[in-house]
């Protein structure tokens, strides 16, 4: 009789195991409005909504989207404690980020304060040697900008997020701010 019960229970367990969805946590930059940000304790943004739509019908997975400071998220990816992070911004310097099919969105960058644009500034880095450029902490810079920093042609200053960098730009503490235009203008 014990064997009969075991035979009845096994198919039920196998069925339950086959239908239980695997939980996957996808981390996102917590301070990158309008793409991904925390407001009143809720994770919101264009990328957050997009990923929720993309994963809504993935019945084999329970996808949880969780905010994280950008630099910590990169560290988690690098050491293997995170499965996914968005937006990925894959560069050769981040060889721990795997190839992906398509970017979520093509962003364009750089905003400068009008007061420094009184002279022609079309050649980089030559025309920007006299200014401080604001960047978000942990953001990877283009090889051209990295080279300009290394060779002391330009100075950059990191800050945590768009709001802080925009305040510094408005106060003329920095002259330019490198970040996505949509993210800057919607703040």
Image: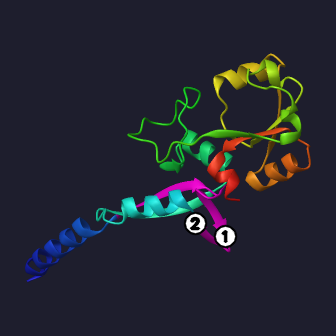
Q: Is residue 173 above or below residue 147?
A: below
Q: Is residue 56 above or below residue 169?
A: below
**Residue 130 highlighted magenta (yes or no):** no
Q: Secondary structure at mark 1?
A: strand
Q: Which residues are magenta?
A: 22-44
Compare residues 107 and 119 and report the one nearer the observer: 119
Q: CA distance from mark 2 to mark 1?
A: 7 Å
Q: Label 1 neighbourhood size at 10 Å, few (<14), some (14-19), many (20+)?
A: few
**Residue 156 picture location, percent across and down:** 82, 33
Residue receiving disc 2: 44
Q: Look at the image and tell me whether residue 161 can be seen.
A: no
Farthest residue to the bottom: give it. 1
Name which residue lies at 53% across and 59% down.
46
Q: Which callout, 2 or 1, points at the residue further toward the start of the chain?
A: 1
Q: Is residue 28 above or below residue 43?
A: above
Compare residues 55 and 106 and report the one nearer the observer: 106
Residue receiving disc 1: 39
Q: Which mark is residue 185?
A: none
The answer to whether mark 2 and mark 1 are in CB contact below 8 A is yes
**Residue 86 picture location, percent across and down:** 53, 49
Instruction: Tell me the quadrant of the picture where the C terminus can be found.
Output: bottom right
* Residue 93 figure quarter: top right
Relative placement, left or right, of 11 versus 144 is: left
């Amino acid at each position: 009789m014990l064997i009969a019960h075991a035979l009845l229970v096994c198919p039920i367990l196998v069925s339950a195991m086959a239908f239980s969805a695997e939980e996957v946590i996808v981390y996102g930059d917590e301070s990158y409005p309008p793409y991904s940000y925390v407001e009143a304790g809720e994770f919101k943004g264009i990328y957050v909504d997009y990923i929720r739509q993309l994963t809504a019908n993935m019945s084999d997975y329970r996808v949880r989207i969780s905010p994280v400071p950008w630099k910590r998220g990169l560290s988690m990816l690098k050491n293997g404690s995170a499965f996914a992070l968005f937006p990925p911004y894959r560069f050769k310097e981040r060889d721990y980020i795997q190839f992906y099919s398509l970017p979520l969105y093509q962003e364009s960058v750089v905003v400068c304060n009008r007061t420094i644009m009184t002279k022609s500034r079309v050649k980089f880095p030559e025309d920007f040697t006299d200014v401080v450029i604001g960047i978000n902490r942990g953001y990877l810079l283009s090889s051209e900008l990295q080279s300009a920093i290394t060779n002391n042609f330009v100075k950059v200053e990191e800050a945590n997020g768009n709001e802080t960098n925009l305040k510094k730009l408005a106060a003329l503490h920095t002259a330019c701010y490198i970040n996505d235009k949509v993210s800057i203008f919607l703040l």
